[in-house]
Image (spheres, rainbow, N blue to C red):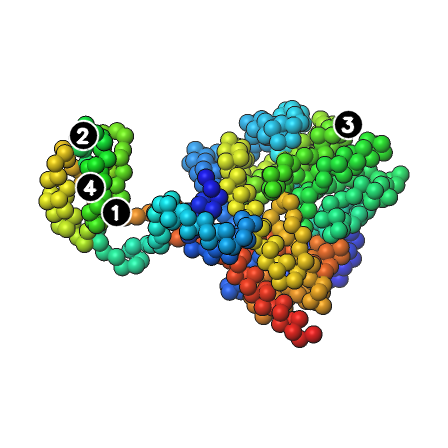
Amino acid sequence: MEYDNKISNIIRDLPRSGIRDFFELVIGRTDVISLGVGEPDKPTPWPIREAVIRSLEKGQTSYTSNLGLESLRIGISEYVTKHFRTTYDPKTEILVTVGVSEALDIAFRAVLNPGDEVIYHEPCYVSYSPSIKMAYGVPVVVQTREENEFALMAEDVEKAITPRTKVIALNFPTNPTGGIMPHEELAKIAALAVKHDLLVFTDEIYSELLYDGRKHKSIVEFPGMRERTILLHGFSKAFAMTGWRLGYACAPAPLREAMMKIHQYCMLCAPIMSQMAGIEALKMGETAYEDMRQSYEQRRNLIVSRLNGMGLHCFNPGGAFYVFPEIRSTGLTSKEFAIQLLEKKSVAVVPGSAFSSAGEGFVRCCYATAPELIAKAMDLMEEFVNEVRGKK
Amino acid sequence: MDPLIELLRNNSNRSPKEIALALGLAESEITARIAAAEADGTILGYSAVVDRLKAGDRRVTALIEVRISPERDGGFDRLARRISKFDQVRDCFLMSGGYDLAVIVEGKDLLDVATFVSEKLSTLGGVLSTATRFELKAYKENGFLANGGGDEERLPVSP
């Protein structure tokens, strides 16, 4: 059968995730030091796992409300009030989802008509552009630049606004760069959203992981923003719960309701086991991640100095657990760099080009890995860089 | 707590250079501060945490609950220090509750520990009673799970 015309044009034309390509090169090798992951190096804290075992013993294995367990939504409401100084009604304004990925997908589908434009920033996590396209929207890219430490500049956003613009999508701290948003730039973007009557989706998945004593501020906290913001957050990064696939959306009731319609038909509800885990995670609160955050900060310091020390320019990112060194000085493309580093030194990093063309010339290194392994990986990378330069 | 000490408590096997990079300080400062902490007794020593079973260590360990009578000057300290000086004693803590000292003793076999308790420990002036509990198996030691404990696997590359 000729399958090409059996598959929807939109899906046929979507590129595969560049991470997936690279993953297939690495999989099956056991000798690799991986800086290629996008998750914490420790499993979910034991009290959370233990609470789920207990809930399974009690036989809590059923469907839940489409919205998610009420006690979880109450916990989310309290957590969001504390961390984002914005309060949402657990009954009408919070939806529990299967990770932020689902929340993002249904948020786009809930608001976009065909041809509506969404402004988002690159380099970014791999799902933004595909999710917009799958919702029949038009992705409009604004590049963030290394000279601004990959923060999004309001003047660049303003240039991208057209009469068809409906949403600005933000994700800071950012995967893959670790870039964060200066508060004054965030205020300017908020003002633009109000001026042009735009919606804002803010993906807060890395918001707990900020360093050097910084305090996170979300765009939802600025004047006029609560009514036009969908706040997306989840448990994966701060609570080391990537495999549980648990996230949530907080939004004014009509927007939450629109998302709920899609969620109830395509997902029904998030798995109850994951929701039980979420309840326990919120009870732990900061104690679940504060030690981890402190140790990430030390690992970041270590990896940034080592990278700069070997002549790979790397800014000191303020959040998440990634560094994004520039590798142009080696004369290699990011893909060549990553593949050769893997083949010659068995160290895995992800080519920046996997996160859009704006990431070309960079590689992503995740430092959520034991310090001894980071040090070893840096030794090997330094050897590699010296060998490549020696050859030129 | 001092972040340097915290870091060493978690893993004392890191080089001063690496610690310096992690804490954003000069290597010379780290070396000097470690030396000072060693000199003033903040750092008591270093040792590897070993899975004794795997290492083929067949010695036995016992927790001895010791009741002692406090002295007019110095309370429990003088006697607790005397007990601590025996090589067989690995740890010695003053405890709240039903007994006074928790003394962890290592010996080559049961008889060795029993002899130590009956001949050395319980005969000390001021020791009122002892109760010996032998350790059967270690599941976690100094914060480390025996047997690795972790068979969790991460994908080598993920988004």
Q: Which residue is mark 2?
A: B71
Assign a secondary structure to mark 3: loop
Question: What is the number of callouts on the image?
Answer: 4
Q: Residue furthest bottom?
A: A391
> Which of label 3 and label 1 is nearer to you?
1
Q: Chain of mark 1?
A: B
Q: CA distance from mark 3 to mark 2?
A: 71 Å
The residue under the point 75% across, 36% down is A184
Report the quarter where the N terminus of chain A lies: bottom right
- Three-letter amino acid code of the residue under disc 2: Glu
Check chain identity for marks 4 and 3: say if they share one: no
Q: Which residue is mark 1?
A: B90
Return the residue at label 4. B82
Q: Nearer the viewer's eye, disc 1 or disc 2?
A: 2
Placement of A194 over or under A42, stated as above or below: above
Compare marks 1 and 4 and give the one earlier in the sequence. Answer: 4
Labels 1 and 4 touching (C-beta < 8 A): no
- Label 3 resides on the chain identified as A
Q: Which residue is mark 3?
A: A224
